[in-house]
Image (tube, rainbow, N blue to C red):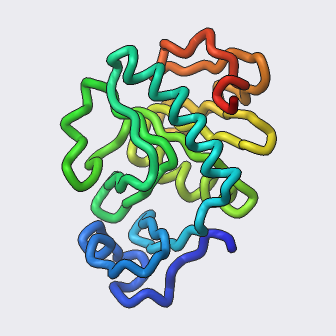
Amino acid sequence: MAVTPADWVAGPQQGHWTYNHYAALPEDGQHYEIVEGVLYMTPAPSIIHQRAVQKLFKRLSSYVEDADLGEVFIAPVDVELAPNAVVQPDIIVVLKANLEKITPTRIIGSPDLVVEVSSPRTVGYDRRIKQDAYARASIQEYWIADPAAQTVEVLQLEGGEYYSLGVFSGPMPLSSRIVPTIKEVQTEQFFA
């Protein structure tokens, strides 16, 4: 199953969903996100996806939290980018200067870095809809990890648009402006 607009869910018209509508949804075992006021249902992650998320989280948190740069979160955590945009990135980095965005129920505002572990079922959603939402929210860095290819593409926001710093793989050191402590870390270590 791919990511689809959840037109069958009772609530406001598509295009008019807000965080308050989203927060009022009954627990039905599904995973929802809102982008531009449209409620989307996303498929349950695969085991391969979850393993990759865990490995990336473990490695990234060691370079952020151990270096006292900020905090790292793993989905599911609600991120309210705007009243009509609520997402749950696979991994979220909030640097110390922005820790006030973290509330007991969600992160309100733009994290400094988000990571999505992409799959064939979510790649279009991750590269179009979510990427555009992240750019509108001014998230400075967006990583798209591909566990099958064991690559990480690092996208940097400049002038309201993302530009690729490269697709990193194998022994190539991963490049990040947000997490400078990883400058010598080989990409393959994020999947090990």
- Which residue shows up at 53% across the image and 37% down it? 142
Instruction: Relative to 181, say whether 78 is above or below.
Output: below
Front-lying residue, 58 or 132: 58
Residue 38 is drawn in which quadrant?
bottom left
- The part of the image, by quadrant, that contains residue 34 is bottom left
Q: Position of residue 155 (x, y in %)?
A: 59, 33
Residue 104: x and y in percent read 20, 50
Residue 139 in the image: x percent, y percent? 42, 38
Q: State which quarter of the image contains the N terminus.
A: bottom right
> Which of 7/174 is in front?
174
Horizontal side, residue 60 vs residue 121: left or right: left
8 relative to 106, above or below: below
Q: Is residue 146 above or below residue 129?
A: above
Q: Image point 66% across, 59% down: which residue? A: 46
On the image, the x and y values in percent for residue 110 come to 34, 42
Q: Nearer the viewer, residue 181 or 50?
A: 50
Q: Residue at x 51, y 28 (%)?
A: 60
User: In the drawing, does residue 98 fall left or right of residue 142?
Assistant: left
